[in-house]
Amino acid sequence: MADTQTAAIYRGNKTFEVTQVPAARPGPGEVGVRVAYCGICGTDMHVFHGNMDARVGFERIIGHEMSGTVDAVGEGVSGFAPGEKVVVRPLDPDLTCPASKAGYPHISHNLKFLGLDTNGAMQEVWVVPAHTLHKLPDDIRMDHAALIEPVAVACHDVRLAELQAGEDVVVIGGGPIGVLVAMVARDAGGKVVLSEVNPHRLAIAQKLGFETVNPAEVDLKAEIDTRTGGKGADVVFEVSGTQPGVDAMTAVAATRARIVMVAIHAQKPLIDLFQFFWRELKLIGARVYEPEDYEKAIGIIVSGGVDAETVITDIAPLEDIQKAFEELDRSPTALKSLIKVGG
């Protein structure tokens, strides 16, 4: 067994260094996962821009949207064997906190997010707690499986919305998560309209078969009222992270609609609380995912409910990670970029 392995280390100042690090070995309760693919998410881009330096430092291996195979298991681990295909649910909660004791460890007060608070998947073998693993079917494509983590985010959002088949849905924001939320909502039977201002993202959404509206060109509320006979949307997902998106989420909502806040806003947005009174709206916060959302995401990927081929717009090898981040940073057309870490 080799003494070193290849990893990409964030060094600050929009820089990654691909270098050799000591080979990963799982300890008690841990599993070493040989990483196949790792996606670049919005949080990773925040790291790249230096917005999370205080949290991650300059020696961090990032990455958490991944697929891989079991490489080795540590002492006391059962149920996993080398060669099995797996994904990692990258949450390590503090089980003693009030949220965990109440049954919500995914939003533990002292949650460690693997790949940000610890080293992540941009390395050949990633050592993680065994409780974070989910097994995959043998025949799943590993590049497609790297979408399971963000699809699980979408599954959590749609589940908390209590979306029913036939309901009118508006997804505000057509970035990677917005598109996945739209696909999961459609898979659940929702009649989805996606609102987005970027023409390239609108084109992708249309290729995926969605009805779209560009609110920079069309009055979104008027369009949704026309489509719903004046009723409005039963479920609204705010995925834009913008003040216009927050303005739109209450404007398009039907009586007793459920609004799910998916996006992380850089600044506290202003919300039209009058609409919550006037139409008896519900506002739902949704953060990361729970184990059942991962299992649902695996099933949707396997069934084709998510068009992985269209969502994945480019793949680069680990040695080209610097170029991949730089190109994604300036690309108006990319949706989901993957790093090919191993075989």
Image: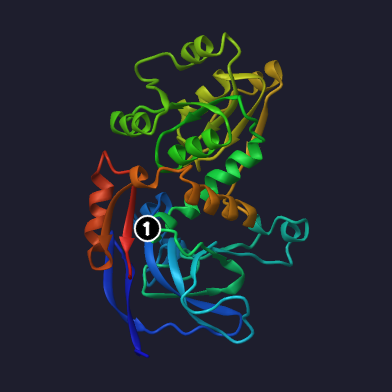
- The amino acid at mark 1 is Asp
Image side of residue 9 versus residue 118, left or right: left
Q: Which image quadrant: the C terminus?
A: bottom left
Q: Position of residue 87 (x, y in %)?
A: 50, 64
Image side of residue 123 versus residue 274, left or right: left
Closer-to-camera residue (313/79): 79
Image side of residue 234 versus residue 53, left or right: right
Total number of numbered discs in the rendering: 1
In this rendering, is residue 172 above or below 334?
above
Q: Which image quadrant: the N terminus?
A: bottom left
Residue 120, visible in the rendered structure: no
Residue 230, visible in the rendered structure: yes
Q: Residue at x 50, y 47 (%)?
A: 303
In this rendering, is residue 317 above or below 44?
below
Q: Position of residue 133 (x, y in %)?
A: 56, 67
The colour scheme applied to this rendered structure is rainbow
Q: Position of residue 200 (x, y in %)?
A: 28, 33
The residue that mark 1 highlights is 143
In this rendering, is residue 138 above or below 218?
below
Residue, far right: 102
For residue 219, which quarter of the picture?
A: top left
Closer-to-camera residue (30/43): 30
For residue 281, which quarter of the picture?
A: top right
Within 10 Å of the Cα at label 1, are there few (<14), some (14-19), or many (20+) other Cα atoms?
many
